[in-house]
Amino acid sequence: MAANRGSRAIPVPELVKRAQAGEARAVARLISMVEDASPLLREVSAALAPHTGKAHVIGITGSPGVGKSTSTAALVTTLRKKGTRVGVLAVDPSSPFSGGALLGDRVRMQDHATDPGVYIRSMASRGHLGGLAWAAPQAIRVLDAAGCEVILVETVGVGQSEIEIAGLADTTLVLLAPGMGDGIQAAKAGILEIGDIFVVNKADRDGAATTRRELRSMIGLTEHSGNSWTPPIVLTVASKSEGIDEVAAAIADHFAYLNESGDLAKRRLARVRREIEAIALVEVRRKFGDLSGDSRLDALAESVVAGNDDPFSAADVLIDSL
């Protein structure tokens, strides 16, 4: 509540202006308004819109334990050496109270905490219909408007969040580690299709070359959205910053490919389509409320159970009655 009161004390246009000037407190307030679904969120979104669309959004995902946070911190170091302004959004799609991963991000990123060219934020999206699709795009816009040239979006890498991250990013990095069965798990989870760059971290362990070989074979059998980009596989030891320059080079190559092929515009269009849909679904539910106790729903359910109707037709009737 304090964040909302603080935000209200400063007009939204002024907050956005301060965020553009790189004021960390203004950026924090705007992202808090996004997380809290502030009544001023529509005004915030409208004020941000003219100042966005410039940042390269990079999604980072992978199973717990593969070294996502360490890799993210090492990548920030590499980008900062080039003078790139960086935003880091660590998204936990399940719980705002699971301190482990989020606190870990802050500890590992402490070397960048006093760098004015880096903005780090942990956020949870629980409670928002659509999960990542609801809050994260607006938070990314805040960082974009604040002048971040590259935005790294890291998820906990569990379940659906691995797939959702691809919908948020221009470039998706999938991290794996040897000895964890990640190659096979990647195939099972369907994340081979969403990875633009694969990183085998902890490559100083036994099995790194085997993991890369398995990945290369599986990628060769996977149709990658019909495009001509072949995802590279980079070996890294993020704790020693080994291979991170190669990851940064692969990211730059992919961004160049996206621009030259026209895929960047296509990806961003698809991303905004999903965002609009997520917002529309929230607004529909908000407008019509919880239908669980609606007598019309009960009657339609009874009709389906009795075999007199089917669920799709019943849903059409319910929508028409609202």
Image: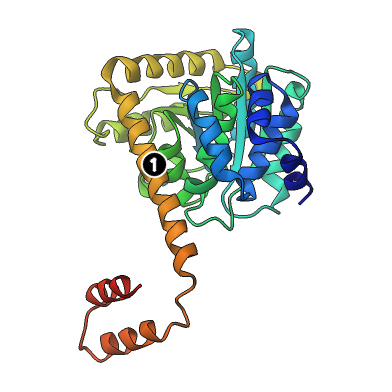
- Residue for point 47% across, 46% down: 133
Q: Which residue is mark 1?
A: 191
Instruction: Reply above or below: 314 against 36.
Output: below
Its colouring scheme is rainbow
Closer to the camera in the image, 189 or 122: 122
In this picture, residue 159 sits left or right of residue 33:
left
Secondary structure of the residue carrying numbered label 1: loop
The image quadrant of residue 205 is top right
In this picture, residue 27 sits left or right of residue 215:
right
- Residue for point 69% across, 24% down: 18
Where in the figure is residue 17, as x and y percent of width and height?
A: 65, 24
| Number of on-image labels | 1
Which residue occupies the extreme top position in the image?
A: 82
In which quadrant is the C terminus drawn? bottom left
The image quadrant of residue 241 is top right
Q: Taking the image as drawn, is residue 264 in sight?
A: yes
In this picture, residue 64 sits left or right of residue 303:
right
Closer to the camera in the image, 200 or 192: 192
Where in the figure is residue 121, as x and y percent of width and height?
A: 67, 35
The image quadrant of residue 276 is top left
Instruction: Reply above or below: 43 against 298.
Output: above
Instruction: Reply above or below: 52 against 307.
Output: above
In this picture, residue 74 sits left or right of residue 318:
right
Where in the figure is residue 72, as x and y percent of width and height?
A: 60, 27
Closer to the camera in the image, 74 or 167: 167
- Residue for point 39% across, 14% down: 253
Q: Taking the image as drawn, is residue 64 in sight?
A: no
- Residue for point 31% across, 84% down: 300
**Mark 1: which amino acid?**
Ile
